[in-house]
Image: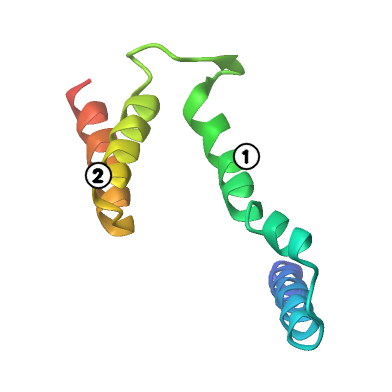
């Protein structure tokens, strides 16, 4: 049990130090415009890398059929995000659609 807590604390500390290093670096150094523009694409790229495999893959294969409830929920959430620009409403609608479809199954 102690090894688990040590692992959690170490991972937290490393995450904190990694983020702090960027905050401290950008507080003292002004990056070039091309780097600043490139860094704007990092969050969408990371989120896409996390979300798309969960939504589009099932059992190691591409699943773009209507019976893929995660895909349907993601499409509804994308529509809500596009129309409302509200993060909480987007997450809530996607979760509600997913849970409703799984319950109706």
Q: Earlier in the sequence, mark 1 or mark 2?
A: 1
What SS does tag 1 mark? helix
Examine the rendered structure and indicate whether residue 74 appears above or below residue 2. above
The label shown at residue 68 is none
- Residue 31 point in image, percent of width and height: 79, 72
- Taking depth in this image into account, of 83 and 95 the one nearest to the observer is 83
Tell me if residue 4 can be seen: yes
Examine the rendered structure and indicate whether residue 31 appears above or below residue 77. below
**Which quadrant of the figure contains the N terminus?**
bottom right
Tell me if residue 95 can be seen: no
Where does label 2 land, which residue?
83
Q: Quadrant of residue 33?
A: bottom right
Residue at point 47%, 30% (across, down): 55
Residue at point 56%, 47% (across, down): 47
Label 2 environment density (alpha carbons within 10 Å; few <14, some 14–19, many ≥20): few
Residue at point 32%, 26% (across, down): 72
Residue at point 82%, 82% (across, down): 29
Q: Quadrant of residue 78?
A: top left
What SS does tag 2 mark? helix
| 95 left or right, relative to 16 | left
Colour scheme of the rendered structure: rainbow
Examine the rendered structure and indicate whether residue 67 appears above or below residue 15. above
Where does label 1 land, which residue?
49
- Residue 83 point in image, percent of width and height: 25, 44
**Which quadrant of the figure contains the C terminus?**
top left
């Amino acid at each position: 049990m102690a090894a688990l807590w040590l692992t959690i604390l170490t991972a937290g500390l490393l995450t904190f130090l990694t983020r702090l290093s960027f905050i401290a670096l950008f507080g003292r150094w002004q990056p070039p415009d091309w780097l600043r523009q490139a860094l704007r694409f990092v969050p969408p790229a990371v989120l896409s890398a996390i979300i798309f495999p969960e939504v589009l893959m099932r059992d190691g294969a591409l699943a773009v059929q209507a019976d893929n409830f995660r895909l349907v929920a993601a499409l509804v959430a994308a529509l809500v995000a596009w129309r409302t620009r509200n993060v909480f409403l987007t997450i809530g609608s996607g979760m509600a659609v997913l849970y409703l479809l799984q319950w109706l199954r």
